[in-house]
Image (cartoon, rainbow, N blue to C red):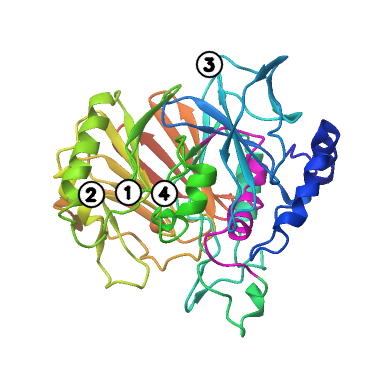
């Protein structure tokens, strides 16, 4: 990993003329959340936008100038995306990256450009530390909440693109007083939580590859939506809306159909949302290249195996009603998270396969081993499938005719290998000794 040490980064930022902004810090010192401290500011990152291009983003302390973004020796214009407020005493800067821009730096720090070739894709999801009522993770224990390890290992594989399949923000209620493992953790939709749940642990990924970012249900407006729109949503507006419009991404061989499933009820088809999703899907189908993947946080066809619902419950009723088992042939796979495990579903080609990569850090869901092959979901039988309950991420390697997938565990070992060819996904476990 070539991640620049934080102290070095900070000294470079300060040398770039941003020290004066620290004078603003006392202005926010009385706020309920921790003020942004230069030593805690994350490395700038680059993400795909809803118009298919790239945007560099950076977080600076209130009143700071946005860092200078350069493409080789050409300066690029930045805007302030989000001004500070009480819950988010930070300023978010955004810089559209022109087509062909290369050798990008933000405040002197190198950030990734549009990849010339896309041969390796890292996928991860459901990454924050759960604090919600009685559901509590030991956020202070990297073994109990391992997103930082997942991000570091995934970054070390040098992917060309990183896809996060959603659910970043998890610290919703206070750490119980009898749980020292999460003592001192912030909670709520504020910068202190976003910093701990996302920007500190994910930092190793930022210098490595541009990010495809999917909104999850944890980023709904009554959960982590304010932070999502301020920092990560791929559109210019920071106003929190219940549902965002679909968009497509064409990244080398990847044709991604991005669908916001955050508000889609899992177990009951929402009669108001079904027609909306039908329109969204229609718009995506019209732009789908052959072998497209629909990227949407909630799986369309998967078992919910998490203890919250009866065994055998499937998801997602709203999206299933909208799709009506009529997805066009050029959609090959649904790429999702939401269920906290690694799962694959192959329906014999009668519909796209379903890949779930939700094992990125939040408490693993109790899953069935093996996946109940032969059972039907939404009227189609599972022909082949796999379910694994280890933390980790997936790395795709481009091969002739498709992609090979390796599922990595926290020990940086491959625990399953899959061949993805069109609508077929065939996986085999890898024994520990290999
Ligand atoms: Fe979710």
Give the residue number, with chain letter if any, for mark 1. Answer: 261
Residue 168's place in the image compared with 182, above or below, is above
Q: Which residues are magenta?
A: 185-211
Badge 4 crowding class, 10 Å Cα cut-off, few under 14, some 14 to 19, many 20 or more, is some
Circle number at residue 97: none
Horizontal and vertical percent position of residue 222: 41, 61
Element type where label 4 sits in the image: loop
Could you give the CA–CA distance between mark 3 and mark 2, rounded to whole angstroms? Answer: 34 Å
Q: Quadrant of the N terminus?
A: top right
Could you give the CA–CA distance between mark 4 and mark 1, rounded to whole angstroms? Answer: 15 Å
Horizontal and vertical percent position of residue 125: 48, 51
Give the residue number, with chain letter if any, for mark 2. Answer: 319
Give the residue number, with chain letter if any, for mark 3. Answer: 99
Q: Is residue 206 left or right of residue 363?
A: right
- The residue positioned 19% from the left and 37% from the top of the image is 279
Could you give the CA–CA distance between mark 4 and mark 3, rounded to whole angstroms? Answer: 29 Å
């Amino acid at each position: 990993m070539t991640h620049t040490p934080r102290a070095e980064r900070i000294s470079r930022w300060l040398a770039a003329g941003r020290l004066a902004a620290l004078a603003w810090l006392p202005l926010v010192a009385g706020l309920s959340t921790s003020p942004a401290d230069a030593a805690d500011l994350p490395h700038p990152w680059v993400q795909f936008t809803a118009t298919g291009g790239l945007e560099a983003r950076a977080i600076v302390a209130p009143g700071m100038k946005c860092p200078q973004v350069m493409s080789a020796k050409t300066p690029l214009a930045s805007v302030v995306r989000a001004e500070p407020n009480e819950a988010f005493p930070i300023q978010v800067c955004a810089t559209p990256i022109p087509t062909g821009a290369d050798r990008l730096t933000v405040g002197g720090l190198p950030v990734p450009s549009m990849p010339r070739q896309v041969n390796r894709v890292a996928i991860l999801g459901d990454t924050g530390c759960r604090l919600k009522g009685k559901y509590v993770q030991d956020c202070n224990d990297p073994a109990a909440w391992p997103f930082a390890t997942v991000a570091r290992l995934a970054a070390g594989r040098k992917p060309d693109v990183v896809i996060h399949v959603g659910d970043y923000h998890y610290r919703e209620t206070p750490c119980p007083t009898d749980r020292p493992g999460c003592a001192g953790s912030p909670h709520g939709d504020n910068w202190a939580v976003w910093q701990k749940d996302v920007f500190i642990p994910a930092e190793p990924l930022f210098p490595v590859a541009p990010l495809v970012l999917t909104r999850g249900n944890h980023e709904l407006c009554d959960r982590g939506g304010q932070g999502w729109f301020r920092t990560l949503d791929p559109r210019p507006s920071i106003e929190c809306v219940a549902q965002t419009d679909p968009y497509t991404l064409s990244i080398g061989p990847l044709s991604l159909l991005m669908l916001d499933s955050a508000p889609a009820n899992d177990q009951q088809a929402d009669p108001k949302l079904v027609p909306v999703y039908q329109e969204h899907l229609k718009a995506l189908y019209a732009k789908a290249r052959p072998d497209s993947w629909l990227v949407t946080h909630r799986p369309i066809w998967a078992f919910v195996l998490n203890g919250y619902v009866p065994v055998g419950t499937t998801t997602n009723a709203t999206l299933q009603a909208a799709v009506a088992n009529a997805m066009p042939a050029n959609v090959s796979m649904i790429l999702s998270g939401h269920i906290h495990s690694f799962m694959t579903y192959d329906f014999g080609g009668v519909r796209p396969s379903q890949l779930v990569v939700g094992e990125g850090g939040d408490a693993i869901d109790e899953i069935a081993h093996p996946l109940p092959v032969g059972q039907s979901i939404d009227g189609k039988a599972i022909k082949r499938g796999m379910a694994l309950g280890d933390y980790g991420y997936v790395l795709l390697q481009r091969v002739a005719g498709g992609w090979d997938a390796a599922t990595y565990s926290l020990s940086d070992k491959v625990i399953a290998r899959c061949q993805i060819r069109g609508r077929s996904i065939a996986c085999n476990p890898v024994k520990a000794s290999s």
